[in-house]
Image (cartoon, rainbow, N blue to C red):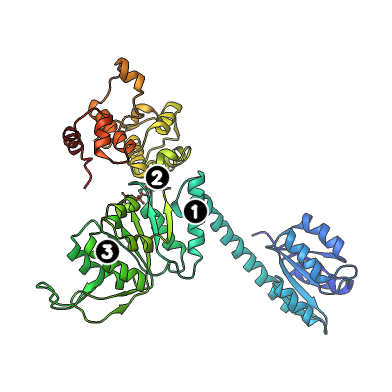
Amino acid sequence: MNPSTLLIVDDERTLARSIKLFMTEQGYEAEVAENGDIALELLDRLRPEVVFLDVCLPGHNGIDLLRRIKEFDRNIAVIMMTAYGSIEGAVEAVRLGAFDYIKKPVDLDELKLLADRACESARLRQELSYYREREIREIPFMGIIGKCDAIRDIIARITQIAALEDSPPILITGETGTGKGLVARTLHRRSRRASRAFIEVNCTALPATLMEAELFGYERGAFTDAKESKMGLFEAADGGFLYLDEVGDTELPLQGKLLRAVEERVIRRVGGLRDRRVDVTIVAATHRDLETEVKAARFRKDLYYRLAVITIDLPPLRERGDDILLLAAHFLEIFNAKYGKAIRAIDDRAARTLCEYPWPGNIRELSHVIERAVLWSHGDRLSVDQLSLTSGPMNLPAKPLPAADLACGTLPREGIDLAAWERSLLEQALRDSGGNQTKAARLLRLSRDTLRYRLKKFGLSQP
Ligand SMILES: Nc1ncnc2c1ncn2[C@@H]1O[C@H](COP(=O)(O)OP(=O)(O)OP(=O)(O)O)[C@@H](O)[C@H]1O
Ligand SMILES: [Mg+2]
């Protein structure tokens, strides 16, 4: 290991020299500066790990110099040396970031111990900052990859929420596969509750009565199968987070009970008589537009307002610009490692195709596309032939067919997937008509019944 370097700043020459001599014998490299100006000059040349600094120096106030040294490099450990009577100055210096202080006349052994301790702690600090930096560089914001404005804003918001002592409910919205679950877990991991539970529950999974028992628990005898009482997920998440995925799918009868739990933070087990207090941070997510659900009387307005105190809206992948390629590179690395491949780049045509595709399944779909491509490719570049974007029922044509092409009936040379086009046009018509089927049917010159039939055929009917 390289010897650590010390700088001794003291105008008492004999003392400074004897420290230098002793510390050199102990394996340190040491230099002396008689005043502040020389000290500042030497900092740059020596890059010392430790500075012994006299509190009273001619020309410079020791505290002032301490500040300058810390400005130069805050990792340098400064040990103040103080004569009898200037202890307050030394204590003030420690408050301002000095590592420690030692009283004059100095005991050389004590001095060495202090220097050893300062070097060790500087080493540990550097190690820690190395790992922190690496974490920030290599695991961008705990796994959320993206540099577009929307993602930057979301990361900033997560940081703000994480700093709250006690967060109100958070509602995450976004299409399927946009990272709602990832954001929910990140909120938890960044929060003060990171060491407590994170419990995830999918609200679509069970009918209302079973869901109620799942969320709030039940007492023995509450129903035929209830042989013993059981704690619900709210209680299990006490002190931590409860992630209510697809909350927009909760059935109406359960929504009232959910509101009480979220708002008053009390729950009652099914078949139970007493209320139990729970301290749970609620994160809810949905791919639905809850305002529309409220208007259609499918979702309680009061519950919506309660859940949406803080909202995070995740944009679809097609609106994230170059993040598509950033994410593709990220998945490439993951699947290279998983399948022992060495694909180092995505060629230009493939990159353009990835950027133009509408990604109905968002980031999840992108990760599957890259996984398949890595699995089947041999070379070191990923080309467009390896991107299986047009297979499978979720895949839509890359762009809406231009009206002119439709009008003159020209087909692209490679042909088209008629079913995928039809589905895409149906979706466009629904979007353009705000979900109004009569208007959508008119746009497509279909009768309402035919439209309904076709929506059903493609699984696009609304509940
Ligand atoms: N910004 C991102 N950076 C890296 N990976 C991401 C990002 N967003 C999503 N992912 C990954 O994509 C996959 C899908 O994300 P996630 O399950 O969180 O989406 P979701 O919105 O909850 O989807 P669903 O609505 O279907 O439940 C996960 O593997 C997730 O880790
Ligand atoms: Mg999810």
Mark 3 vs mark 1: in front: 3
Q: Pointer 2: what residue?
A: 334
Residue 255 is situated, as x and y percent measured from the top left of the image, at 27, 64
Q: Mark 2, residues whose alpha carbon is within 10 Å: few (<14), some, or many (≥20)?
A: some
Q: Mark 3 or mark 2, which has the lower sequence index?
A: 3
- Farthest left residue? 224
Mark 1 vs mark 2: in front: 1
Mark 2: C-beta under 8 Å from nearest atom of ligand 1 = no
Residue 255 badge:
3
Q: Mark 3, residues whose alpha carbon is within 10 Å: few (<14), some, or many (≥20)?
A: many
Element carrying mark 2: helix
Element carrying mark 3: helix
CA distance separating discs 1 and 2: 22 Å
Which amino acid is tagged 1? Answer: Ile
Mark 1: C-beta under 8 Å from nearest atom of ligand 1 = no
Residue 155 badge:
1
Q: Residue at x 21, y 79 (%)?
A: 272
Residue 286 is situated, as x and y percent measured from the top left of the image, at 33, 53
Element carrying mark 1: helix
Q: Mark 3 or mark 1, which has the lower sequence index?
A: 1
Asked whether, in this view, residue 432 is left or right of residue 96, the answer is left
Q: Quadrant of residue 58?
A: bottom right
Asked whether, in this view, residue 315 is left or right of residue 16, the answer is left
**Which quarter shows the N terminus?**
bottom right
Q: Mark 1 or mark 2, which has the lower sequence index?
A: 1
CA distance separating discs 3 and 1: 30 Å
Residue 263 is situated, as x and y percent measured from the top left of the image, at 36, 70
Judge whether 199 appears above or below 139 on screen.
below
Q: Residue at x 19, y 59 (%)?
A: 206
Asked whether, in this view, residue 401 is left or right of residue 154, the answer is left
Which amino acid is tagged 3? Answer: Gln
